[in-house]
Amino acid sequence: MSGNSDPLTPRAKLAVTAGKAAAAVSRAAGRGSGSVIGGRVALRLDPDLLARLATHLDVILVSATNGKTTTTRLIAEALRAAGPVVSNALGANMPAGITSALAGGSDAKFAVIEVDEKYLAGVARDTDPKAIALLNLSRDQLDRAAETRMLAEHWREGLAGTKSVVVANADDPLVVWAASSSPNVVWVAAGQMWKDDAWSCPSCGGVMQRPGDDWFCGECGFRRPTPSWALSGDYVLDPHGSSWPIHLQLPGRANKANAASSAAVAAVFGVPPQVALERMYQVQAVAGRYDVVQFMQRDLRLLLAKNPAGWLETFSLIDPPPTPVILSVNARGADGTDTSWLWDVDYTRLTGHPIFVIGDRKLDLAVRLEVANQHFQVCENLDQAVQAAPPGRIEVIANYTAFQDLRRRVGN
C-alpha cells in the first residue's frame, strides 16, 4: 500500500535523525557516502526500523550475483512513470545501507532495493515486497560466500509461499529452483552466458542436459519453465507476443537482459513495456560503471567485473583489438581475498589486445595471463599503464575495490 500516514514512532524518528547525522559526519570526513554507518546507527537505536520504513511503500527487491545494481537502476527509472521512487542507487545492499536509503524516501510510492544475495530472505521478511527480481547465481567471493547451490537453497526456503510476484530468469537453473517455491512467478528468458555453475541439477544433483537454450535434468525431470517474457535480440517479447525495441545507452547483451527483466517488473505495477523501455534510455552509467572519462588526455571506459561470469560478459562488450585494455584486480575484504577465481576466466578472449596489468594482485593476474599465452605488461599504477598504452580509447576492467580506486584516481 502507499499513502502519507506516518508509520514512524518517536523512537524510529530519533533513529532516522541519528543515522542521518552519522552519515553526514562520515561524508564530511571523506569516508564515503555514509549510508552504511548511518544505517548501522539507526538500526542500533531501533532494530525494527527497516520494517517500519517499508510499511507505506510498494517495495521491489532485486538480487543476483551480477547485474543487480544496473537492474535496480533500470527498474527505478521505469517506475518513475507511475510515482516517486526511493532506491539504494549506490549499491549499499545490506540491511544498514537499505535502511539508510529508505530513510530518505518519506514521500516515495515505490522502493526499488538492491539486496546482497545472502540477505535476500531476511530483507524480504522485513519489507514485505510486492515484487522480487531474481536474475542469476554464480560463484563469487569464494572465501566468504556460500556455494551457489546453498545460496539457491537459502532463497528457496526464504521465499517459500511468499505473496510477492517473483520475476525470475528461466535460463538459470539455480534461479528457477530457488523461485519454484513461490506461488506467483513470472518467468523471463533473459539468457545465461556463463554456464559453469549450472551443470548439476540443483534439485537432485544429476547432470543437466543443455541442448541449445533449453535445459533439463534427465534424472528427476526438473526443467526450464516456459517463459512469458523474453529477450530476443534487440527486442523484449511480452506475454501477449508483442515485441518492444530496447534502446539503451548501456552496452552489451547483459544489459539488454537486465532491461527485459526490468520491463517485466514494471508491468507488475501497470507500467507498459513501451513506457518502461523508453525511460530506461535515460540511464547512461550506473555508479560509475560504463562511464567514459578523460584522464591524462586519454579516454578511458570504466568497466566493473567481479567474478568469472561478470568478466565473460564484459569481454563481450569491449571494443575489438587492437584496443588497449587495462586490467586491475584487488583481493580486499569487499572483493573476497581468494583470487583462485582468476583461473575460471577465459583470458584468451583478450588475444590481440595490448594488455596492461595493475592492482594489489597484479602478479596473481600476470601468472594467469602468462598461462593463457597473452601478451601483457605489468605496471605500478594507472598513470604508468595509461602512459604505456598505444593510441585510442582504453578499456579499463576492474573488480570491486580496484574499480573504486580507479574512480578516485580519475576523479569520477
Image (cartoon, rainbow, N blue to C red):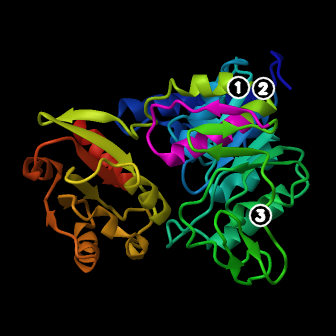
Name the spot of residue 79 as percent of width and height, x first.
68, 25
The residue tagged 2 is: 8
**Which of 327 and 155 lies nearest the eye of the viewer?**
327
Residue 250 on the magenta segment? yes
In this rendering, the answer to whether 1 lies above or below 398 is: above
Name the spot of residue 393 as percent of width and height, x first.
21, 41
The residue tagged 3 is: 224
Residue 13 is labelled as 1
Q: CA distance from mark 1 to mark 2?
A: 6 Å
Q: Quadrant of the N terminus?
A: top right
User: What type is the residue that disc 1 sits on?
Assistant: Lys
**In the picture provided, is 199 more to the left or to the right than 357?**
right
Residue 334 on the magenta segment? no
In this rendering, the answer to whether 161 lies above or below 32 is: below
Q: Local crowd at mark 2 within 10 Å, few (<14), some, or many (≥20)?
A: some
User: What type is the residue that disc 2 sits on?
Assistant: Leu
**In the picture provided, is 374 more to the left or to the right than 276?**
left
Indicate the secondary structure of the residue bearing disc 1. Answer: helix
**Which of 146 and 53 lies nearest the eye of the viewer?**
146
Q: Earlier in the sequence, mark 1 or mark 3?
A: 1
Identify which residue is drawn at 68% across, 66% down.
151
Q: Please state which of the two labelled residues, at mark 3 or mark 2, is closer to the viewer.
A: 3
Residue 152 is labelled as none
User: What type is the residue that disc 3 sits on?
Assistant: Arg
Q: CA distance from mark 1 to mark 3?
A: 47 Å
**In the picture provided, is 192 more to the left or to the right than 51?**
left
Identify which residue is drawn at 68% across, 72% down.
149
Identify which residue is drawn at 33% across, 61% down.
330
Q: Earlier in the sequence, mark 1 or mark 2?
A: 2
Magenta residues, start to end: 241-264
Q: In the rendered image, which quarter is residue 238 located in? A: top right
Tag 1 near tag 2, CB within 8 Å = yes
